[in-house]
Amino acid sequence: RFAQSGRLAEHAERTRERGRERLAAALSACERYFPPGTSFTRPEGGMSIWVRLPDPLDATELLPRAQREGVSYVPGRHFAVGPHDSHTFRLSFGGLSPSSIDAGIARLGRLFQEDMERSRRTPNFEAASALV
C-alpha cells in the first residue's frame, strides 16, 4: 500500500536529496580541512568516501586519537586482500547531518595537520655505521 499510495516515490526522492546534501557536505569538508596531499573519492553512490592521507600519516595509528575526538573511520587494512596501504581509510557519512559531517571532518583535519606538524619537528635520523 505504501508503494501504491505514491509515498514510496516521495520517500525515495527525499532519501536521495538528503544523500546528496550529506555527500556535498563531506566532499566540501574534505577539501577544506584535510592536509595538502590528501586524496579522496567522489562517489556517484553510497554513503562513504575512500581517503588516502599523505606521508607520513598512518590511518590505523591515528584512529584511537580520532575516536577520542568523537570521530571514527575504518582503516583501509580492513578492506585489503593483500598488502595494504596504511595511509587509507573509509569515511562513512550516512545518517549524519551536514553540520555534524562538517564538524567531524574538521576534527579529523585538525588531528591530521597536528600529526604532520609533529612529524616535521621530529628529527629523522638515518642509521649509520659506528666508527671504531
Image (spheres, rainbow, N blue to C red):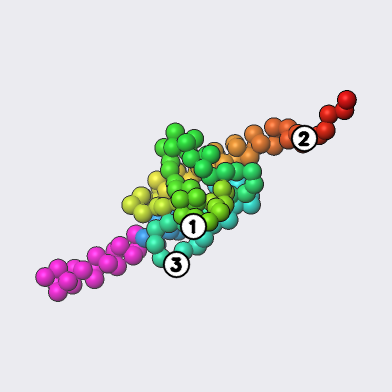
What residue is rendered at 46% in x and 55% in y?
A: 79
Q: Where does label 2 land, which residue? A: 127
Q: What is the secondary structure assignment of the residue under circle 1?
A: loop
Identify whether 112 is placed above or below 23: above
Q: Which mark is residue 81?
A: 1
**Quarter that holds the N terminus:** bottom left
Q: What is the secondary structure assignment of the residue under circle 3?
A: loop
Q: Position of residue 106 (x, y in %)?
A: 50, 43
Q: Where does label 3 land, which residue? A: 44
Q: Earlier in the sequence, mark 1 or mark 3?
A: 3
Q: Position of residue 19 (x, y in %)?
A: 37, 60
In magenta stretch: residue 98: no
Q: Amino acid at mark 2?
A: Ala
Bounds of the magenta span? 1-18
Instruction: Judge left or right: residue 45 versus residue 40.
Output: left
Q: CA distance from mark 1 to mark 2?
A: 33 Å
Q: Position of residue 70 (x, y in %)?
A: 41, 37
Identify whether 45 is placed above or below 80: below
Crowding near the residue tagged with mark 2, few <14, some 14–19, many ≥20 C-alpha atoms within 10 Å: few
